[in-house]
Every structure is written in structure tokens, then in C-alpha cells.
């Protein structure tokens, strides 16, 4: 599972989310994440098994790219992105 947490763009990425009491947004399973990679929505440099972060600017770009898509993979991703945009926040992802 890949767990997404809200993080301000200016904050340093902690080694684990509990260090800064980051707010959990949602998770995404391996199969759904791989389908998004295959569809070209998520860049290949964001590996499922490596922690990574997306800035608020990147989140807006991803959302604009996917907001019209209607399958379940896009719905899950868009819900995650929308929660971050509602709080004007970035996201950090931790693989567990």
C-alpha cells in the first residue's frame, strides 16, 4: 500500500509521517498505481516502493490532467489530489 499524507511545500520530508503528525489522506494499492503509471498519468520516476512527494503545484497539474477521466483508478487519484488542493497542500507518499 502507498499511503498519502498532507505536507506543506515548505516543510522538510520526515523519515516517517508520525514525526510531524502528518494528516493521512488515503492509500493506493500497487495494481491501481501501476495502471496509472501505464496510462502515463504518473511519471515513472515516482516508484511505488520509494517514498516521494508532490508539491501543491504538481498536484494541480496532475488534477488538471486527470479530472475528466472516469475510471476507478482516476477517481481514487483525483480524490487524493482534491483533498490536498482543498488544503493548499502538497502530498508525501510512504510505501509500507
Image: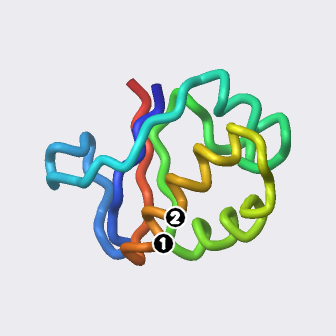
Label 2 crowding class (10 Å Cα cut-off): few <14, some 14-19, many 20+?
Answer: some
User: What is the quadrant of residue 13 in the picture?
Assistant: bottom left
Q: Is residue 68 above or below residue 69?
A: below
Q: Position of residue 70 (x, y in %)?
A: 78, 49
Q: In the shown orientation, is residue 10 left or right of residue 69?
A: left
Q: In the shown orientation, is residue 30 left or right of residue 38?
A: left
**Residue at 62% across, 43% down:** 46
Q: Is residue 72 above or below residue 86?
A: above
Say if mark 1 contacts mark 2, CB within 8 Å: yes
Q: In the shown orientation, is residue 77 left or right of residue 70?
A: left
Q: Which residue is mark 2?
A: 82
What kind of element bears circle 2?
helix
User: What is the quadrant of residue 7 in the picture?
Assistant: bottom left
Q: Position of residue 9 (x, y in %)?
A: 39, 72
User: What is the quadrant of residue 88 in the picture?
Assistant: bottom left
Q: Position of residue 31 (x, y in %)?
A: 66, 22
**Residue at 45% across, 40% down:** 51
Q: Is residue 24 above or below residue 9?
A: above
Q: Quadrant of the C terminus?
A: top left
Furthest-front residue in this view:
70
Separation of disc 1 and disc 2 at Cα?
A: 5 Å
Q: Which residue is mark 1?
A: 85
Q: In the shown orientation, is residue 15 left or right of residue 85?
A: left
**Residue at 24% across, 45% down:** 17
Q: Position of residue 23 (x, y in %)?
A: 25, 54
**Residue at 76% across, 41% down:** 71
Q: Is residue 30 above or below residue 86?
A: above
Label 1 crowding class (10 Å Cα cut-off): few <14, some 14-19, many 20+?
Answer: some
What kind of element bears circle 1?
helix
Amino acid at each position: 500500500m502507498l499511503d498519502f499524507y498532507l505536507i506543506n511545500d515548505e516543510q522538510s520530508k520526515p523519515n516517517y509521517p508520525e514525526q510531524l503528525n502528518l494528516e493521512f489522506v488515503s492509500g493506493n494499492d500497487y495494481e491501481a498505481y501501476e495502471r496509472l503509471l501505464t496510462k502515463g498519468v504518473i511519471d515513472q520516476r515516482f516508484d511505488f516502493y520509494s517514498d516521494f512527494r508532490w508539491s501543491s503545484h504538481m498536484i494541480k497539474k496532475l488534477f488538471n490532467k486527470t479530472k475528466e477521466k472516469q475510471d476507478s483508478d482516476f477517481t481514487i487519484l483525483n480524490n487524493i489530489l482534491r483533498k490536498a488542493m482543498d488544503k493548499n497542500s502538497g502530498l508525501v507518499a510512504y510505501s509500507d
